[in-house]
Amino acid sequence: MSKRVISLPTGEYTREILFMADIESMHNILYSIQEIKLAISRLSPEQLATFREWFDEFDAKAWDEQLELDAMSGKLDELANQAISDFRAGKCKEL
């Protein structure tokens, strides 16, 4: 059995989880993705627009949640400190 870390939506949050799977399980996941792709390709223009709107909101929420988790865990501290340092040193310009 192989081990992999993958990101999956879990309720309202996206989490990285340790996924232990054999080759058959991985095949089933890939097969499901292919089924999703096929189903999307068969949507009418109106259905595709509805799906696109939903997915954009879903993706943005997952992005925001991951950014919040990264900020709370300290992953962004170095970048924030560099930005503050650059600002104080006058290395920024007004947009």
Image: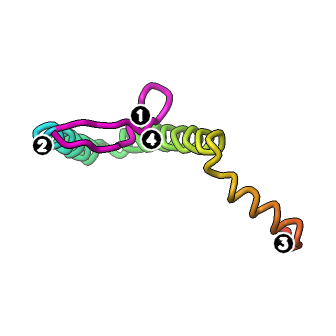
Look at the image and give the residue range highlighted in magenta.
Answer: 1-21
- Give residue 25's position: percent from left, percent from top: 16, 37
The residue wearing badge 1 is 9
Q: Are marks 4 and 3 in contact (CB under 8 Å)?
A: no
- Cα–Cα span, label 1 and label 3: 38 Å
The residue wearing badge 4 is 55
- Cα–Cα span, label 4 and label 3: 35 Å
Q: Secondary structure at mark 4?
A: helix
Please tell me which residue lies in front, 8 or 43: 8
- Give residue 53's position: percent from left, percent from top: 48, 41
- Cα–Cα span, label 1 and label 4: 13 Å
Quarter-wise, where is residue 29 in the image? Answer: top left
Marks 2, 3: nearer the viewer: 2
The mark that comes first in sequence, 4 or 2, is: 2
Q: Secondary structure at mark 1?
A: strand
The mark that comes first in sequence, 1 or 3, is: 1
Q: Is residue 33 left or right of residue 94?
A: left
Q: Secondary structure at mark 2?
A: helix
The tag on residue 93 is 3
Marks 4, 3: nearer the viewer: 3
The outermost residue toward the top is: 11
The residue wearing badge 2 is 23
Q: Is residue 86 left or right of residue 39?
A: right
Please tell me which residue lies in front, 2 or 70: 2
- Give residue 71's position: percent from left, percent from top: 65, 44
Q: Looking at the magenta stretch, what is its main secondary structure?
A: strand
The mark that comes first in sequence, 2 or 3, is: 2
The tag on residue 67 is none
Amino acid at dot 1: Pro
